[in-house]
C-alpha cells in the first residue's frame, strides 16, 4: 500500500469568506440600529465619516485628491498646515502619505497619518502639554 501525499495543498482551499468573518451575531431585537457604540467605536466611525465627506467631492470616492486633501486639512486640521505661507505644504504632505504612489490618498494611507498624528499628540500631552 502506497500512501500518496503529493497534493497536500489542495485541502486548504475550503475556507469560505463566511468562515473567516464569523463575527458574533448582533443581538438586535428591535429595528433600532446600534445605539450602544462605545466611545472608541464612535471615534473610529467619525474618522471614516470625515474621510468620506471629503473623498467624495471629486474623482474617486475611495481616495483624496490633492484638492480634497487640502480642503480636509484646512477644515479639519487648521493648525497643521500653515496655508498661505507654505505653498508646497500640501504637495509635500501628499507625497509623504501616498504610499502606493497613485497621487491620491486612500483611506489606509489616511488612517496611517491620523494614527501618527494622534500618537504625536499623545506624546505631547504626556509631556504636560503646552506650558
Ligand atoms: Ca495613494
Image: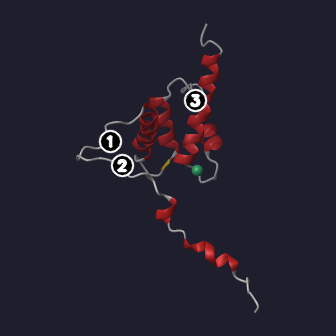
Q: Please tell me which residue is depicted at 64% across the width and 78% down the height of the picture.
A: 10
Image vertical order of residue 130 relative to residue 18, above or below: above
Give me the C-alpha separation between circle 1 and circle 3: 27 Å
* Image coords of residue 105 (percent x, y): 55, 46
- Could you classify mark 1 by the number of other residues whose Cα lies within 10 Å: few (under 14), some (14-19), or many (20 or more)? few
| Image mark for residue 118 | 3
Within the image, what quadrant is residue 50 found in? Answer: top left
Residue pictured at 59% horizontal, 30% vertical: 117
The residue mark sitting in front, 2 or 1, is 2
Count of picture labels = 3
Disc 2 crowd rating (10 Å Cα; few below 14, some 14-19, many 20+) is: few
Residue 6 left/right relative to 10: right
Compared across the picture, whether 12 is left or right of 4 comes to left
Q: Which of marks 1 and 3 is nearer the N terminus?
A: 1
Q: Distance between the residues labelled 2 and 3?
A: 30 Å
Q: Looking at the image, is mark 2 or mark 3 nearer the viewer? A: 2
Q: At which x and y percent is residue 79?
A: 53, 23
Question: Which image quadrant: the N terminus?
Answer: bottom right
Secondary structure found at label 2:
loop
Q: Earlier in the sequence, mark 2 or mark 3?
A: 2
Numbered tag placed on residue 34 in the rendering? 1
Q: Residue at x 41, y 34 (%)?
A: 38
Question: Which quarter of the figure has residue 87?
Answer: top right
Residue 65: x and y in percent read 51, 47
- Between 59 and 115, which is closer to the camera in this rendering? 115
Provide the residue designation for mark 2: 26
Give coordinates of residue 37: x percent, y percent: 38, 36
Looking at the image, which residue sits at the far bottom? 1
Give yes or no for contact between labels 2 and 1 (Cβ–Cβ under 8 Å). yes
Residue in front for this viewpoint, 87 or 95 = 95
Q: Foreground mark, 1 or 3?
A: 1
Residue 106 appears in the picture as rendered: no
Amino acid at each position: 500500500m502506497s500512501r500518496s501525499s503529493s497534493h497536500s495543498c489542495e485541502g486548504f482551499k475550503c475556507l469560505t469568506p463566511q468562515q473567516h468573518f464569523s463575527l458574533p451575531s448582533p443581538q438586535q431585537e428591535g429595528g433600532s440600529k446600534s445605539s450602544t457604540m462605545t466611545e472608541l467605536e464612535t471615534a473610529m466611525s467619525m474618522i471614516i465619516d470625515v474621510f468620506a465627506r471629503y473623498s467624495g467631492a471629486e474623482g474617486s470616492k475611495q481616495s483624496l485628491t490633492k484638492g480634497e486633501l487640502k480642503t480636509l486639512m484646512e477644515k479639519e486640521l487648521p493648525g497643521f498646515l500653515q496655508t498661505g505661507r507654505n505653498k508646497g505644504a500640501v504637495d509635500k504632505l501628499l507625497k509623504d502619505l501616498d504610499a502606493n504612489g497613485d497621487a491620491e490618498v486612500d483611506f489606509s494611507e489616511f488612517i496611517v497619518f491620523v494614527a501618527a498624528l494622534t500618537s504625536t499628540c499623545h506624546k505631547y500631552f504626556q509631556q504636560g502639554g503646552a506650558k
